């Protein structure tokens, strides 16, 4: 008899959205982040950092009456510019503090938290 592989699940326990962060390059768009904290066990919390992106979509086939229509679509993508995926903490508060600290250090900003 073969044994089944055990996989674990996590629960999303906190979501925070940051105000846009302006970059030094005045032609660059502001960065908009969403932070998610997941609980994997009573003492194991991990983060995900999402960045809002806008894409312009154009259909590959077009009806006569909608010729040339384009749509802007906003979506979140996992951010790969910040080393957030190594954050693993024993509490929700320490995980959230760690990701906030990384963002503050990386962008030289101070984040005023609404939960304090």
Image: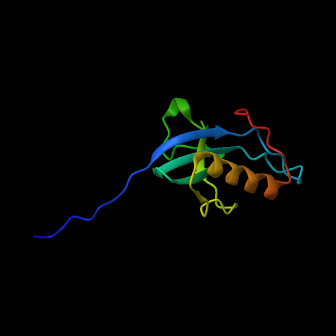
Q: Is residue 35 visible?
A: yes
- Left or right side of 112 for 33: left
Q: Nearer the viewer, residue 17 or 99?
A: 99
Q: Nearer the viewer, residue 69 or 67?
A: 69
Residue 25 image offset from top left, x and y in percent: 88, 54
Q: Which residue is drawn at 29% across and 61% down?
A: 6
Q: Residue at x 52, y 43 (%)?
A: 59
Q: Which of 73 and 19 is in front in this view?
A: 19
Quarter containing the C terminus: top right
Where on the picture, by quarter, is residue 32?
top right
Q: Nearer the viewer, residue 19 or 100?
A: 100
Residue 31 image offset from top left, x and y in percent: 75, 47
Query: Where 112 sits versus 42, above or below?
Result: above
Q: Which residue is drawn at 51% across and 33% down?
A: 64
Residue 10 image offset from top left, x and y in percent: 43, 49
Q: Which residue is drawn at 77% across and 41% down?
A: 20
Residue 3 image offset from top left, x and y in percent: 18, 67
Query: Where 19 sits versus 99, above or below?
Result: above
Query: Where 21 sits versus 69, above or below?
Result: below
Residue at the far top in the pictured view: 65
């Amino acid at each position: 008899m073969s044994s089944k592989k055990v996989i674990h699940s996590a629960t999303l326990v906190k979501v925070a959205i940051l105000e846009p962060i302006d970059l030094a390059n005045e032609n660059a768009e502001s960065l908009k982040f969403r932070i998610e904290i997941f609980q994997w066990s009573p003492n194991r919390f991990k983060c995900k950092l999402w960045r809002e992106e806008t894409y312009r979509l154009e259909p590959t086939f077009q009806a006569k009456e909608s010729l040339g229509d384009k749509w802007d679509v906003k979506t979140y993508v996992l951010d790969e510019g910040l080393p957030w995926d190594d954050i693993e903490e024993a509490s929700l508060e320490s995980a959230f503090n760690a990701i906030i600290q990384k963002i503050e250090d990386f962008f030289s900003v101070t984040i005023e938290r609404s939960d304090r």
